[in-house]
Image: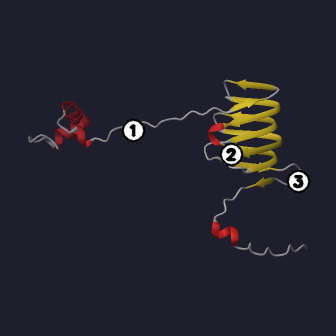
């Protein structure tokens, strides 16, 4: 790895890495032993939001849309409607509120009063209107084996 001549340990302690850098530059230490740097590719996908009124604060990087909000995120196959949408670029989340309906390309859907979409994890966190519930519909692919088998019986609901 190093040239055949000896480097005294006192010189290494005295000069530290300063002795090794010229060896790397001169090619004494094989560049084949170094791992090449790999750059991460950043994919950019637009989120289209239409609404009656929109505001954007460049400093906080927050966009607010109000009134007849429609959101389209083609890269994730998501369409949504709401009364209001807030896009938090730094936090990488979208908060939809007011009669929220989200439809995914797969056919899955969710309804609620307030839904937070966490962009990086692809998660939805839905909250209902007071005294109500969140409603979701999930499409399940059936294969030939499960389509013919009877569904298990659901136990009766016991009320206190």
Mark 1 is surrounded, within 10 Å at the Cα level, by few (under 14), some (14 to 19) or many (20 or more) other residues, namely: few
> Looking at the image, is mark 2 or mark 3 earlier in the sequence?
2
- Residue 105: x and y in percent read 68, 45
**CA distance for labels 2 and 3:** 26 Å
Calculate the distance from the C-alpha at mark 1 to the C-alpha at mark 2.
33 Å
- Report which quarter residue 98 is drawn in: top right
**First in sequence: mark 3 or mark 1?**
1
The C terminus lies in quadrant: bottom right
Q: Which of 122 and 149 is in front in this view?
A: 149
Estimate the spatial distance between the alpha carbons at disc 3 and disc 1, rounded to whole Å: 50 Å
Q: Is residue 91 visible?
A: no
The residue sitting at 81% across, 75% down in the picture is 155
Q: Where on the picture, by quarter, is residue 10?
A: top left
Local secondary structure at mark 1: loop
Mark carried by residue 38: 1
Instruction: Say which residue label 3 marks.
Output: 132
Disc 2 marks which residue? 105
Is 117 displayed left or right of 44 in the figure?
right
Give above or below for 49 relative to 112.
Answer: above
Locate residue 86, reporting x and y percent. 74, 34
Q: Which of 147 and 89 is in front in this view?
A: 147
Residue at the (79%, 38%) spot, across then down: 81
């Amino acid at each position: 790895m190093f040239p055949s001549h000896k480097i005294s340990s006192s010189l290494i302690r005295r000069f530290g890495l300063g002795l090794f850098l010229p060896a790397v530059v001169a090619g004494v230490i094989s560049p084949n032993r170094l791992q090449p740097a790999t750059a991460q590719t950043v994919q950019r996908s637009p989120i289209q939001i239409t609404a009656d009124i929109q505001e954007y604060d460049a400093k906080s990087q927050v966009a607010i849309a109000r009134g007849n909000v429609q959101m389209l995120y083609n890269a994730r196959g998501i369409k949504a409607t709401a009364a209001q949408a807030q896009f938090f670029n730094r936090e990488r989340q979208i908060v939809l509120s007011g009669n929220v309906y989200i439809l995914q390309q797969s056919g899955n859907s969710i309804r609620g009063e307030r839904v937070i979409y966490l962009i990086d994890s692809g998660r939805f966190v839905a909250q209902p209107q007071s005294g109500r519930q969140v409603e979701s519909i999930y499409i399940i692919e059936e294969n030939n084996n499960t389509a013919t088998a009877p569904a298990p019986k659901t136990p009766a609901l016991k009320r206190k």
